[in-house]
Amino acid sequence: MATDRHFVYVLRSDREPDRYYTGLTPNLAIRLTAHNNGRCSHTSSGRPWHIDLVVEFADAQRAIRFERYLKSGSGVAFAKRHLRESVAPAILRYAQVWVAISEPGEIG
């Protein structure tokens, strides 16, 4: 079912390339449009944004936990080490990364 899809996403600002934003949505296209149209106060000054990373979850609670983790101190450190351009420039700068997580388990 399409309603069972939950996306944790990381956006990267084209204006400020060292600026990232992490969020959660059931509809990535609509949410990205909202960010780029200035309808989100946390991202309006960094427009335009592009998708840097997407992780799809079938379970809403797991998606919420993962988004909270990426926004935590240890999650930000994890992202800097493993998900940002300095680690994998060819993959993360120009490509959208889609990962489906299907096995249950804790994050962190």
Image: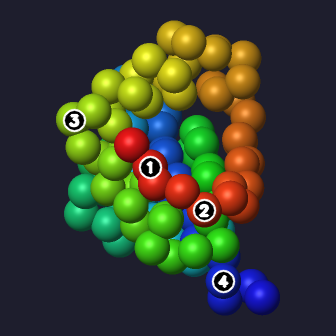
Residue 25 lies, in percent from the top left, at 51, 71
Circles 4 and 2: CB atoms closer than 8 Å: no
Which residue lies at the image location 73% right of the left edge and 55% below the top edge? Answer: 100
Residue 6 shows in the view:
yes
Circles 1 and 3: CB atoms closer than 8 Å: no
The residue at which mark 1 appears reads as 107
The residue at which mark 3 appears reads as 73
Question: Mark 1, residues whose alpha carbon is within 10 Å: few (<14), some, or many (≥20)?
Answer: few
Quadrant for residue 56, please give it: bottom right
Q: Earlier in the sequence, mark 1 or mark 3?
A: 3
| Left or right: residue 54 compared with residue 2 | left
Q: Earlier in the sequence, mark 4 or mark 1?
A: 4
Q: Identify the secondary structure beneath mark 2.
A: loop
Q: Earlier in the sequence, mark 4 or mark 2?
A: 4
Quadrant for residue 35, please give it: bottom left
Looking at the rendered structure, the kind of residue marked 4 is: Asp
Question: Mark 2, residues whose alpha carbon is within 10 Å: few (<14), some, or many (≥20)?
Answer: few
Would you place residue 55 above or below residue 60 in this image? Answer: above
Q: In this view of the protein, which residue sits in the foreground, 74 or 19?
A: 74
- The residue lying furthest to the front in this view is 105
Q: How many circles with numbers are drawn on the protein?
A: 4
Q: Earlier in the sequence, mark 4 or mark 3?
A: 4
Whole-number angstrom distance, CA of label 4 to CA of label 3? 29 Å
Which residue lies at the image location 51% right of the left edge and 11% below the top edge? Answer: 86
Q: In this view of the protein, which residue sits in the foreground, 77 or 59?
A: 59
